[in-house]
Amino acid sequence: MGANGRFGMAMVQALRERGWQVRAQTRAGWRGEGRVEEVHCDGHDRAAILAAARGCQVVAHALNPSQYTQACWRRDALPMLDNAIAAAQAAGALLLLPGTVYNFGSSLPATLTEGTPAAPGHVFGAIRIEMERRLATAPGLDSFVLTAGDFFGQGTGVWFDKVIAAGLQRGVFTYPGPLDSVHAWTHLADLAEAFARLADQRAGIRGFNRMMMPGHDLTGRQLQEALQRVLGRPLRARALPWGWLGLMRPFSPMLRSMWGNRYLWRRPHALDGRALRARLGDWTPTPLDTALAQSLRQLGQEVAAEGGACAA
């Protein structure tokens, strides 16, 4: 569901590479690469979603509300998830859902594990917690949530490409938080690969499951140094002008939403992915420099190497 989104496209690619036949739900036609069985319908159309999922063994929920605003999420997030749940129940399919650290609120601990209690601090966190509660209480549903950090790779629309990568070609590294604070990052292709491997294990997955996604837990300085290696040139660090965003937020619902999540850049946090690593066996995330090089190329930026030399 939502095959044209950045996570949806990554899921299609990962599943196809593992030999799956993919049925791609979109509203206006598949825009990605590779052959899929296309289904054109709206994520709010329950009858169409149920029909689209008929005969499927796995349902990947990659639909997001159309705008990153509280109003849009309040209106759309839960109804679309309810349709995904109904479709997976009717088909007897495993339901896959990417999770976020929003669930743990502004007082989230330095290391997040499967046992970290939920503590919503804003609308997005409360909605995310309710989404997982509905998975856990849906009768007869088998589901798996992977809690991920901030995405990078596979297109545009997130902090990495909108803020951090935007000035790299001018030699500027813009960072939203203190350079010495740890932040959890997830290479989107790795998240899709992990989900595809879980799809292969569907026969052994019962009930509701949630694990932390192993990724790259980095300080701002470590990310800057890695980007310098990949680009082969020094970068000048610059802080994101939060004060300006604060002044502008009365005029932009999206800026208000971004402002409400600024704590994630000030509160150090990392994901303990040992449980998922143990479950998936020999799988490991893409090395950082390789993942960054791939991500920058996808943004049309030139890179020097996957781990070249650079004098800071």
Image (cartoon, rainbow, N blue to C red):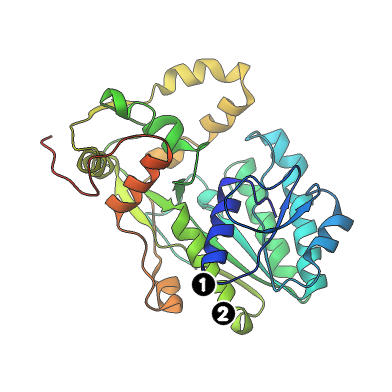
Residue annotated with mark 1: 197
Q: Can residue 302 be seen at all in this image of the molecule? A: yes
Q: Is residue 141 above or below residue 71?
A: below
Using residue 112 as the reference point, say whether residue 97 is left or right of it. right
Identify the residue at image location x=51%, y=72%: 197
Identify the residue at image location x=13%, y=39%: 310
Q: Tag 1's secondary structure?
A: helix
Q: Is residue 42 above or below residue 69?
A: below
Q: Tag 2's secondary structure?
A: loop
Mark 2 vs mark 1, CA separation in Å? 7 Å
Quarter holding residue 135: bottom right
Q: Nearer the viewer, residue 107 or 163?
A: 163
Q: Nearer the viewer, residue 54 or 81?
A: 54
**Residue extending farthest bottom:** 204
- Give the amino acid at mark 1: Arg
Q: Residues within 10 Å of mark 1 (few under 14, many from 20)?
A: some
Looking at the picture, how far across and down is residue 29, in whole percent? 72, 45
**Residue extending farthest front:** 35
- Give the amino acid at mark 2: Gln
- The reply to whether dot 2 and dot 1 touch (C-beta < 8 Å) is yes
Q: Is residue 1 above or below residue 174?
A: below
**Which quarter of the image is occupied by the C terminus?**
top left
Looking at the picture, how far across and down is residue 289, in whole percent? 27, 50
**Which quarter of the image is occupied by the N terminus?**
bottom right
Identify the residue at image location x=40%, y=73%: 277
Residue annotated with mark 2: 201
